[in-house]
Image: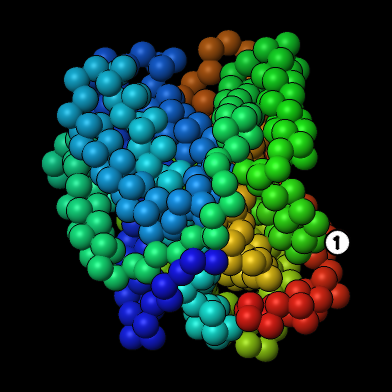
Amino acid sequence: MNSAPAPASNRWLVLVMVCIAQFMVVLDGTVVNVALPHIAESLDFSAESLPWVINAYTLVFGGFLLLGGRLADIIGRKRLFLAGIVVFTVASVACGLAQSPEMLLVARALQGLGGAMVSPAALSIVTTTFRDPGERAKALSVWAAIAVGGSAVGLLVGGVLTEALSWEWIFFINAPIGLAALVASLRIVPESRMESRGGIDLAGAVSVTAGVTLLVYAIVKAESFGWLAPRTWALLGGAVLLLGAFVLIERAVKVPLVRLGIFRMRHLTGANLVMLAVMGGLFGTFFFTSIYVQNILGFSAIETGVAFLPMTITIILFSGLAQQLLARVSPRSLGLAGMITSAVGLLMLRGIDADGSYWTDLLPGILVIAAGLGLTFVPLTLIATSGVADEDAGLASGLFNASQQVGGALGLAILTTVANSYTADALGGLTGAPTPEEQASALVEGFQRGFVAGAGLMIIGAVLLAVLVRKRDLDAVNAEQPAAVHI
């Protein structure tokens, strides 16, 4: 591998730079949610098109992550990281300047592309910069706290900027952050890439990007189309065909975009499957609780953001605790404990009520969920990126980020389907037009079932971790990869 390792004194500055950029990308996944009503009114979005302010970002971000991760290995991780910051920052300004729904949706898609360049490149920079086991565990604990805590912070930032200034500023705020990260990273972040192996596998790049994008689109639309609708199955079938073609292409070409042998690493494949389930539960939690706080408890946009601050702080604290515990507990055991803890927190939210209180009905549950997530993300990130050759660092990072996006979209679609089904049943059992109180009660009943389903996803993740990531697999990684972090 061609690389220029960061000096010891600069490694932590490198971490600061990539975390700032990653925070900006993660923040944008949720910062828009609170501002959607203001965006709809300002740009005259229809009810049907408004969700695409979020979906346009999610689709492109999720679809290009795997390609972005591999390109980081091939053309240089720093180079792709910097290019991604430029694309993301310029697209953010374009979002704020948008004068029509079409302009905003195109700019949001470009933001997603920039994010798909930044995220895998940034994580692979972390894993190739920090080689000491203890230092890498510390660095990944910070990374994990940013990755999961940034989503909660987005709700606060979105509320404050929207109410204090205007919705455009949820995008404009990225300009100074992106510019500062770009200028500082030019000097501080080291370059690294794999040895040249020839040209880029264009057919593989097109097939995997189209396949993952179509898969995310099918999942996003499944709740509105219906899971059993022909359109849903046609989209899912098309995604499977494209991804199947990608596998055949990678087997046939001399220089594949993705070295399929990486999936024989049982711990890596297992950690990515576990992340699908964990992110499904997490995205559903943010969705249901944010609606409950605003529509049922009557919180303003700023109050909603502040309501999630305890969750963010708890995630950060327990991510730091996880890093300390990894010196004495295996990441497999810690991850299991974290997922079970989050499942308990989700089940606690089963008791929320239409006449409930934030302090007694919501806060205890989200604090327990946050503690579990803090204990989960650090070990899962460590398992998914350890024992991987430096030349595959970007690929492993892209896989892990893609698992988060696909898992979040899939989980949210499943959980909202469950919740909406129970809400419809509750309203259908009423005689006459429902009162506002009855509508609120039916909505909360759907949320309750959604939280139970989210707990089920967390338990599925724990089972997958226990079954697929075996202790002897991790021991083999440690024995065969002396330069890697011991897990």
**Residue 254 x %, y %:** 70, 43
Quarter in which the C terminus is drawn: bottom right
- Render colour scheme: rainbow
Picture quarter containing residue 227? top right
Q: Residue at x 34, y 67 (%)?
A: 189
- Looking at the image, which is closer to me, 33 or 389? 389
Asked if residue 334 lies left or right of residue 58, the reply is: right
Picture quarter containing residue 250? top right
Asked if 219 appears above or below 233 in the picture, the reply is below
Asked if residue 147 lies left or right of residue 459, the reply is: left
Element at badge 1?
helix
**Residue 186 x %, y %:** 26, 62
Asked if residue 139 lies left or right of residue 408, the reply is: left
Asked if 176 appears above or below 256 in the picture, the reply is below
Q: Residue at x 71, y 60 (%)?
A: 268
**Amino acid identity at mark 1:** Val
Q: Residue furthest bottom?
A: 328
Asked if 437 appears above or below 266 in the picture, the reply is above
**Residue 220 x %, y %:** 57, 28
Graded by Cα atoms within 10 Å as few (under 14), some (14 to 19) or many (20 or more), the crowding at tag 1 reads: few
- Looking at the image, which is closer to me, 419 or 110? 110
Q: Which residue is mark 1?
A: 467
Asked if residue 267 lies left or right of residue 101, the reply is: right
Quarter in which the N terminus is drawn: bottom right
- Looking at the image, which is closer to me, 11 or 339? 11
Q: Residue at x 41, y 72 (%)?
A: 4
Q: Residue at x 24, y 39 (%)?
A: 90
Q: Mark yes or no: residue 249 visible.
A: yes
Asked if 63 appears above or below 83 in the picture, the reply is above
Q: Mark yes or no: residue 412 visible.
A: no
